């Protein structure tokens, strides 16, 4: 049975912890200020500003910080300070038999995918793939769309229905570009045409890659983390699920390699449908022949008979939609649409 955390009230306490990489103080302070301006009290984990190589403190310290926040009766939500790397190293130090006794809102993305997968596997708790506390002046919680989506989750006004898109992002109807020749297998073959924007990049907004309609619980997150946890106790189960994937800073051949791993372990075939978010800075290096990352995605997701929509505004791009991981969602490539079918938390009156 799924478990859902209660939403927050004004004045409730939000804990900021750093399960992964070392934190940038100025960006953290900016994000904390935004949380306080929303009307929440903020507690910052003791190791959040520690440095242990590229980590925010050693594994035991980070796990202690997280556990302390999760079991603190005053804390109603935990928001990761940032991603980076390190959450997988922390997982063995979390006592899930203790954590299961508490239900709280958990928000983060990127390396925090490790926590989303672990909390779903260990306790079937719905968590949120969304903005973290470190915020640049023109990124993260500083952007109106990201902040509004973040606020709606904390205060319980996030409601089932279609995924809210930034105003300037269009959708591409099936048959108008992304769904062209959708039934013709293209894996391991030259890719078909992709509708492009004037910049030469694929068009922004939701774009169907393969026609169809599917319903299932939403799972996934960062592709590297999903691949890294394969074979562990927190390995992602995609059977009958809607699989969401995003990535940053990986060249096309590395994205190809990780997708190949998921394909060969049956993870892609087992999923009911696919959602693709931002694949940011995943360009090929100069000097060697290469596919583009968009061509790689086409090779794995077009011609499969499994509904697939790309362009979800979530991941390491400018826009960071709140995606409730574990919540039931329906995808339909006709428009295309992404529709959430349940409230992902227990709303306080």
Image (tube, rainbow, N blue to C red):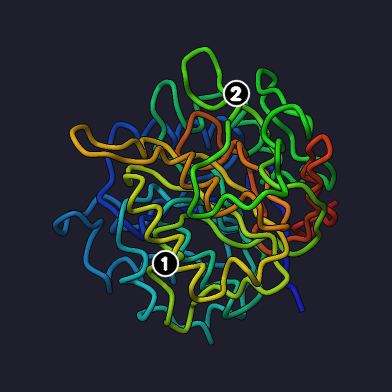
**In the depicted view, which residue is nearer to us: 298 or 236?**
298
Determine the residue located farthest toward the left in the rendered image: 53
Q: Quadrant of residue 31?
A: top left
Identify the secondary structure beneath mark 2: helix
Examine the rendered structure and indicate whether residue 47 appears above or below residue 297: below
Residues marked 1 and 2 touching at CB (< 8 Å): no
Give the residue displayed 36% in from the left and 45% down from the top: 252
Question: In the visual, does 103 lie left or right of 248?
Answer: right
Horizontal and vertical percent for residue 191? 52, 41
Question: Can residue 348 be seen from the camera position used here?
Answer: no
Mark 2, Cα crowd under 10 Å, few <14 / some 14-19 / many 20+, is some
Horizontal and vertical percent for residue 255? 39, 52
Horizontal and vertical percent for residue 196? 56, 22
Label 1 and label 2: CA atoms lie apart by 32 Å
Q: Quadrant of residue 348?
A: bottom right
Examine the rendered structure and indicate whether residue 120 appears above or below residue 92: above
**Looking at the image, is mark 1 or mark 2 earlier in the sequence?**
2
Q: Which residue is mark 1?
A: 227
Question: Can residue 145 be seen from the camera position used here?
Answer: yes
Give the residue displayed 19% in from the left and 54% down from the top: 54
Q: Which residue is mark 2?
A: 144
Quarter containing the N terminus: bottom right
């Amino acid at each position: 049975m799924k478990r859902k955390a209660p939403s927050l009230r004004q004045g409730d306490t939000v804990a900021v912890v750093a399960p992964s990489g070392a934190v940038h103080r100025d960006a953290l302070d900016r994000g904390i200020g935004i949380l306080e301006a929303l009307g929440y009290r903020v507690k910052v984990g003791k190791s959040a500003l520690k440095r242990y190589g590229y980590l925010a403190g050693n594994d035991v310290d980070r796990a202690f910080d997280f556990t302390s926040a999760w079991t603190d009766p005053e804390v109603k939500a935990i928001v990761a300070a940032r991603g980076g790397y390190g959450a997988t190293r922390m997982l063995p130090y979390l006592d899930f038999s203790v954590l299961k006794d508490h239900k709280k809102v958990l928000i983060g993305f990127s390396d925090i995918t490790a926590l989303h997968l672990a909390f779903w596997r260990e306790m079937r708790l719905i968590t949120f793939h969304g903005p973290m506390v470190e915020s640049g002046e023109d990124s993260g919680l500083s952007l109106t769309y990201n902040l509004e989506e973040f606020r709606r989750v904390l205060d319980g006004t996030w409601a089932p229905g279609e995924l809210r898109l930034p105003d300037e992002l269009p959708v591409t109807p099936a048959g108008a570009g992304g769904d062209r020749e959708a039934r013709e297998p293209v894996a391991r073959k030259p890719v078909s045409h992709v509708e492009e924007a004037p910049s030469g990049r694929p068009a922004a907004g939701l774009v169907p890659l393969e026609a169809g309609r599917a319903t299932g619980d939403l799972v996934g997150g960062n592709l590297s983390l999903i691949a890294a946890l394969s074979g562990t106790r927190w390995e992602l189960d995609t059977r009958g699920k809607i699989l969401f994937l995003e990535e940053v800073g990986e060249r096309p051949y590395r994205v190809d390699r990780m997708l190949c791993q998921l394909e060969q372990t049956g993870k892609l075939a087992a999923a009911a449908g696919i959602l693709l978010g931002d694949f940011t800075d995943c360009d090929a290096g100069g000097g060697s022949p290469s596919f583009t990352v968009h061509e790689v995605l086409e090779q794995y997701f077009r011609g499969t008979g499994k509904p697939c929509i790309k362009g979800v505004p979530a991941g390491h791009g400018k826009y960071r939609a709140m995606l409730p991981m574990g919540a039931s969602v329906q995808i339909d490539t006709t428009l295309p649409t992404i529709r959430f079918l349940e409230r992902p938390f227990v709303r306080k009156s």
